[in-house]
Image: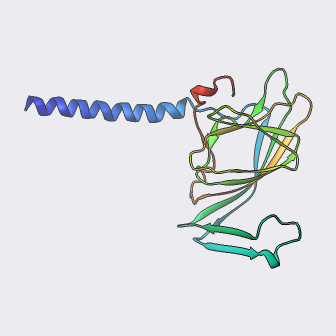
Amino acid sequence: MRRRQIWLVLLFSAAILVAAHHYARKVWATTATTGFKGTTLYFGTLQEFEVFNHARKKSLPAGFEGNAWLSLQKTKGASDLYIQSNTWAPVTMGVVASTGWHTHPGHSLIIVTAGTLTEYHADCEPHVYHAGDTFVDPGEGEEHIIRNESSTEPAANVAVQLVPHDPLKMNRRIDVPQPETCQSIN
């Protein structure tokens, strides 16, 4: 009987530690800084779908590299589609405008529309994008931060995001703690 009580106490303690760690991560999460503004331009909900497109050499545009182009998008369950406009002010009085560390439950297709943006992941390596550049945020737990490190010009992008349907509209962006490996990047 005594041994069973000890195991129950240990199991209960472990459950409390796991829950405390989960909620502590939310408390330590970073948020966007002054100078960053995200605006949802459009929003819609799509039902489950599957689309497959392909083109072969004869129907590809002149100058296309390769012999085929493929695109596959498949969802299971409803999805929320967002068109997001984001702006970053230039560095002002030492404050770097940033998204804060975050992730998304789905992917984003991004076009930089003005200025220069620098994206960091947990490896702390800068990925620099200029106006006209595009990039993909794979989402699904890929934690990152996007900043405008210019002291002279604002920056902007437009993102198309597809995430699992959330009736409360709370899952498009998930704030996360700053990685220990990147303490100087916030």
**Left or right for 100, reference 3:** right
**Front residue of this view, candidates 84 and 113:** 113
**Residue 141: % across, % down:** 56, 45
Q: Residue furthest right?
A: 152
Q: Residue furthest left?
A: 1
**Front residue of this view, candidates 93 and 61:** 61
Residue 184 occupies which quadrant of the picture? top right
**Residue 74: % across, % down:** 59, 68
Residue 71 occupies which quadrant of the picture? bottom right
Q: Is residue 160 above or below residue 152?
A: below
**Front residue of this view, candidates 73 and 69:** 69
Q: Quadrant of the C terminus?
A: top right
Q: Measuring 81% from the left and 47% from the top, which residue is drawn there? A: 157
Numbered disc total: 0
Q: Is residue 166 above or below residue 62?
A: above
Residue 176 occupies which quadrant of the picture? top right
**Residue 109: % across, % down:** 73, 55
Q: Is residue 64 above or below residue 15?
A: below
Q: Measuring 66% from the left and 74% from the top, which residue is drawn there? A: 52
Q: Measuring 57% from the left and 71% from the top, which residue is drawn there? A: 48
**Residue 121: % across, % down:** 65, 37
Q: Is residue 59 above or below residue 176?
A: below
